[in-house]
Amino acid sequence: MIQYSIQKREETLENGMHVILVRKPEYVKSLFLLAAPIGGFDNRQSVDGQIKEHPTGCAHFLEHKMFNYKDGDVTDDFARMQASTNAFTSYTETAYYFQTTSDVEAPLKLLLDFVENLNITQESVDKEKGIILSEYNMYQQNPETHLMRNTWNALYENHPLHIDILGNVEDIENMKVEDLQEFYSLNYDPSRLTLVGITGKDIDSIFEIIKEHQRNVPSHISRNVERAIKEEKEEVAQAYIREEMETSTPYVCVAYKLNYFEDVNTCLEHDLALSTTLDAMFTTMNPEFQKWMDDRIITQMVGAECDISPDHGFMMFYGMTEKVEEFIRIVEDTVEKIQKEPIDLTVFTSLKRRGIAQNIRSLDQYEGLAVDLIHAHLQGYDFIESLQFIETFTPEKVLEYVKHFDFSKKIVSTIYPKTSNEAE
């Protein structure tokens, strides 16, 4: 078994902030990422056992406003320090980060300062609404994004996957400064933050810089704050969704609502097994794939993916095609075969080698490694151990995992070219 290793130091500070530093000897680049455990799934939280409903999109809206720092844009401050900065909001995390090939002390302190201090007014919030609504409208006009949004709406009735990370239009338009201040106070306390740094510099001296800085930033939160996801029914919310848009070619997604597992490592193992199966059966690894392309049932825009997490599970096949019904049929045929026999040994060996190679490369990809370390810490699993799961797999073991899924809950989401109305 390959021994994946990284030179890492990990510690929880007195104020509760968790710090993970990774040293990459002889590398000149440094990246530091500070994350809060909140995202699109956190519109509803349990605060000391009491349910608190937030406006949808709070996490993303707050991400935008955090860059207003001391009456200016903190991006300019980073630039003067020869560092570039950015941020993102996912379903489960909001993260702020900078990269530099210069000294890290000043930009690192700035990263901690601006994330741990909120200074907003209703006027600044109102100005931001137009920017976020423009972003929302841009995504709504993209057929691929719209296809995925309709897919979530068809699969889920209560799970926040069916709510856009940006929030809904009404909540964005009515966002108040008090909404964001309360959301910030609950979720941006140092005790809820995780800092990951990847650098070629000495991590012990950087740890001392962080410790010294955080001595003056005590934790103020005494409440227990947790994500609260409504119970989701087993059935899909809607079996079929059809929409028309300004597009020249139809889009289709066939998705399955799957069972999931509360234990995070069990989720990871089942997710990897199902992902490996999809790679074997719905990519060029499958000899039939080229025939599907020759018959124009699939095009270059095609894919299959799955996600098995402690609160949801799904598998989906999507593509852009003129032959929607034929696409649906090959998906149904593929799903019917998934649980019948193991992956061909030659194909499996190739996929396993590719997976191991990707794992090795991932340790040198700064942004991806930082996000993986954050995600693993927040979800409660060991990142290095998770890389080794694939090495224990065999075709028979993969099939055993895949047989645990129920593929009976299917939805079809389609987007067709808008038809002209001659009466108009």
Image: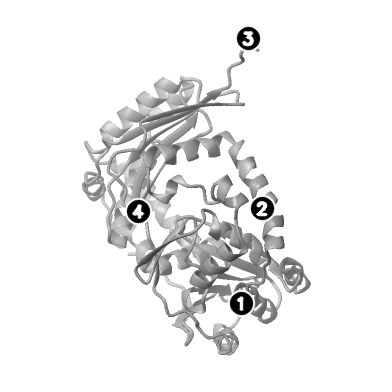
Q: What whole-number distance in Å separates the C-alpha atoms at marks 4 and 2?
A: 28 Å
Above or below for 157 versus 324:
below
Residue shown at the point (56%, 51%) measured from the top left: 171
* Amino acid at dot 1: Leu
Quick check: marks 4 and 1 in contact, CB under 8 Å?
A: no
Quick check: marks 1 and 3 in contact, CB under 8 Å?
A: no
* Amino acid at dot 2: Lys
Look at mark 3 in the image and give the residue it sits on. 423
Question: Residue 224 sits in which quadrant?
Answer: bottom left
Camera-side residue of 8 and 112: 112
Q: What whole-number distance in Å separates the C-alpha atoms at marks 2 and 1?
A: 26 Å
Position of residue 374 measured from the top left corner of the image (x, y, whole percent)? 47, 67
Position of residue 190 measured from the top left corner of the image (x, y, whole percent)? 51, 78
Residue shown at the point (43%, 41%) measured from the top left: 152
Mark count:
4
Along the polypeptide, which appears first: circle 3 or circle 2? 2
Look at mark 2 in the image and give the residue it sits on. 129
Quick check: marks 4 and 3 in contact, CB under 8 Å?
A: no
Position of residue 220 measured from the top left corner of the image (x, y, whole percent)? 50, 82
> Is residue 424 rendered to the left or right of residue 171?
right
Along the polypeptide, which appears first: circle 4 or circle 3? 4
Q: What whole-number distance in Å separates the C-alpha atoms at marks 4 and 1?
A: 33 Å
Along the polypeptide, which appears first: circle 1 or circle 3? 1
* Amino acid at dot 4: Lys
Look at mark 1 in the image and give the residue it sits on. 112
Look at mark 4 in the image and give the residue it sits on. 230
Along the polypeptide, which appears first: circle 4 or circle 2? 2
Residue shown at the point (46%, 81%) measured from the top left: 16
> Is residue 404 rendered to the left or right of residue 50?
left
- Mark 1, Cα crowd under 10 Å, few <14 / some 14-19 / many 20+, is many
Along the polypeptide, which appears first: circle 2 or circle 1? 1
